[in-house]
Structures are given as C-alpha cells and as structure tokens.
Amino acid sequence: MFSKEIENSKNIYIMKLHTAFSSVLKGLIVVSFVFFLSAAGFQDKLTSGWYQQYFPNLNGSTIKDMTFLDSLTGFAITTTNSSVQAYILKTTNGGDNWNIVHTYFPPSTGTILTGIMFANNAIGYASTSYHEFFKTTNAGENWSNISEPPWSIDGLYVLNTDTLFAASSSPFGGGVFRSTNGGYNWQIIWNIGGGSGNPEKIYMVNKDLGFTQDEGASTFMKRTRKGGFNWTEIPGEKFKDIKFSDSNTGWKVYSSIKKTTDGGLNWFVQQTPNITTSFTNKADLCVLNKDTVWMVGAYYNNGGVIFKTTNGGTNWGYQIPNTTYPVTSLYNIDFVDSKHGWAFVIYGTNNLLFHTKVGGNDTTIFTGINNNSGVVSSDYQLNQNYPNPFNPSTTISYRLAKSGNVRIKVFDISGKEIEELVNKRLQAGSYKITFNLTKYSSGIYFYSMIIDGTVVDTKKMMMIK
C-alpha cells in the first residue's frame, strides 16, 4: 500500500516535471522565434515555390516577350539571331516544354519581333520592327503576315478581336496607329508632327482611355480620353510599364511604383521594400485584380526579385525566385491566376524561365518594417502597440500634428488585410485604440497608418495565445 502511494507520488511528480519542461520549451521556442525574426529583418528567402524551365535551342536568339492564356498555354517571341531568324514559340504544358510554331525571316538582323498579344484563346497578333504584321486564328498553330503597317511597331496593344493599337517611335512617320478590322488595315491617328517624341509604348484601358510613353529624357507620359485621337501630357509622370484593374485603378513603375484611383490623372507613391533605389528599363507589371499586383525589375544583392502586393499596394513584399544565377533583374512577369505565374530573364546568352504553381515562395517577404522607426515625422507619429507580444488585446496610440483622413489597418503575415481599426477624418491631436484578435491564430501581424491615401508608417506585432 505504502509502495503504491510512493509510486503514485512519483508519477504525479514526473507529470508535473513534464508539464513544466513543456512550458519552458514552448517559451524558449517563442523567444527564439522572436529573436530569429528580429535578427533576420523578417526575411524569408524560400525558393521552393519557383522552379526553372527550359527553352529549346534557339540558335542564339533570346526571348523578347511572353504571354500566357491560361495555366497551360503560353507563347513567346525572340530576337533575331545571326542566321537572320526569329521565332514564335508555344507551350501547352505550362512552360515545361516549348515548340517553335513559326520562324520569321526578317530582312536583316536589325529587324525583330516586337510584341505578342492575344484577343482570345484563338486569335493572336505579333508585331515587328518592319512593315510586317502577323496573325493567328487557330490558337497559335499557324501565323500569317496579314498587313503592312505604315511604320515599324515598337508597342502593341490588342483591345479586342477587331480593335488594335500600335505605337511607333520613328521621328518621321511614327505615332499612334489603329486598326478596326483585326489588323488588316491601319490608320495613323496621332503623331508628334515630326522630330522626336513619338511613343514607344502604348497601353489602352478601354476604347477611350489610354497612355503612351516615349524614351525621351525630358518628356512625360501622355493620356487620352478620346480613343487615341487626342493626347494630354501628365506633368512629372513617366512609366516603364503601366497596368489597370479597372477604368479608375491602376499602377505604373518608373523610379518608383505609383498608383492612381482616378483614371491616371493623379498618381501617388507606393511604399515598397527598401531593397533597391531604382528599377531597370525591363520593369514589368502584372495586375490580377484591384488587390493583387506583381512586378519585376527590382534587384537585391545582384539578384532579381519579384515584388508582390495582395492589398492593392498598401503593403508590398518581395520574393526571390532563384539563387543560382546572379541576375540583376527579371524581364517579364505573367500570372494567369493567384497560383500560376512565370518570370524570365536573359543571363548571358541563356534564356532563364521560372515558373510557380503555388503563387510563388511559401511566404511573401516583407522588409523595411521596424518596431521603432528612427525617423520621427513632425506631421504624425505611430507608436508601437502595447503590450507586445499580446494575448488577445493590445493598444495602438498615435498622434497627428494636423488634420487628415486617417485609416489604420491590420494585416496578416501574407499581407492580407484582416481588420480596419480607424477610417475617419481626424483633427490634430493624440489618439489611441484598443482591439483584440481573438478570432485569429498566434503569429506575426502588421498595422499601417494611412493618411490621405498614403501609407506613412508600418509596424509589426506578435500575438501569442
């Protein structure tokens, strides 16, 4: 009997010791997690979400442009090689294998395929820097030279099966062209009137609203509301690429990423990861919807990176699709849905293509988020939440030196907005708000202060249940 009581006491002691040890171990894991995030600057450089794909032998040609119609079907065009050949390629298995479906024999090595774009799954177009224009009506299996545009085409935009726009930067004879019968005939609808300034790039949001850009150092982008017949310069604004999710909301990239919510009349800077101060001329955007935007053209430690936002640009993160090649930037980004995407770059004479079926890296990477900013603005102050870590309630205090429209939003680790704590116009003064995240799991969260549409500060916090 006595020995049984000793045995029971022993078992109880072991159970308590095990419980205590588990609690200590949990605490050590949490502390280690916090120190890891802090030391690493909250950078997750997983590359498992992307894998490399390969093009066939192109005899020295390199990829010029790429477009995908769905998760399986895609097309690419190339530069002209020393044998005076350029190619149109097609894949039907998501880029794992490519076939040359058309060989273009231009008049010289200086002539190239300049763009490829589809109106639907069957009808597509390919432009050249010569008086030749190609069309397919059977999903890219066959291509025919259907017309001779008035001049070489630098930029192509396909609005629908009938209406196409083209830009030519030639100082004589260049300008904006339009076809209303599927590329068979072209009409010049605008030009600069001689000399430099004709556009190299064109993007049409709809049949009325569009934008052009030339490569002049002192010229700014132009905007049309008249279907391309009249253009107005937007002072101070340029673009390397521009995309819209609807007639009001769009993004462009030049020396920074900017967003518009009024159809391109006004643009404001987005707060992007502080890993680079410039973007290359190959910068490219892919806008899935009003929330999700991808961009290439930035670099970090001589590595090409991909920027991503899932909340319309309130917060941006970045991913590194490869660590094998020290490429300075990627050239093109194309997603057909939230999971399936491609990015390519030319490394020497190699055509490097990277593909994801899971939306990229496992975790979108965030940088430039500090718990205590070393820069204090005279116009606002966003304080660190207290307590931090917390469970499940915490308080955020902030100060305004002048009135403004204030929003404070909370985001999860992927950048998805989960709560809006404040959305009102406030007068100058000090404020605080207490909230809880009971319905959410333990982990890292972010909160941002947005004043008059601009993100002015972002901080991270941790909830431990």
Image (cartoon, rainbow, N blue to C red):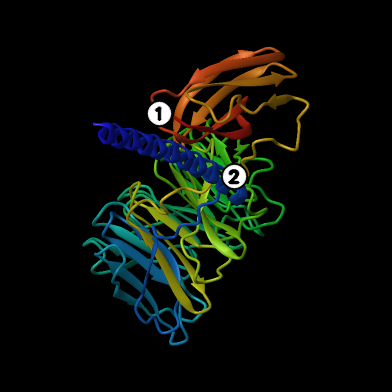
Q: In this view, does 134 lie above or below 413?
A: below
Q: Callout 1, which amino acid?
A: Tyr
**Which numbered circle lies on residue 440?**
1
Let me know if residue 189 appears in the view: no
> Residue 69 placed where, x, y %?
30, 55
Is disc 2 surrounded by few (<14), some (14 to 19) or many (20+) residues within 10 Å? many
The residue lying at 41 percent from left, 38 percent from top is 17
**Which numbered circle lies on residue 272?**
2
Kind of element beneath mark 1 = loop
Residue 109 or 151: which is nearer the viewer? Answer: 109
Looking at the rendered image, the quarter that the C terminus falls into is top left
> Residue 366 placed where, x, y %?
54, 45
Q: Is residue 42 above or below residue 129?
A: above
Q: Callout 2, which amino acid?
A: Thr
Q: In this view, does 1 lie to the left or right of 332?
A: left
Between tags 1 and 2, which lies in front?
1
Of all residues shown, which one is farthest toward the left?
138
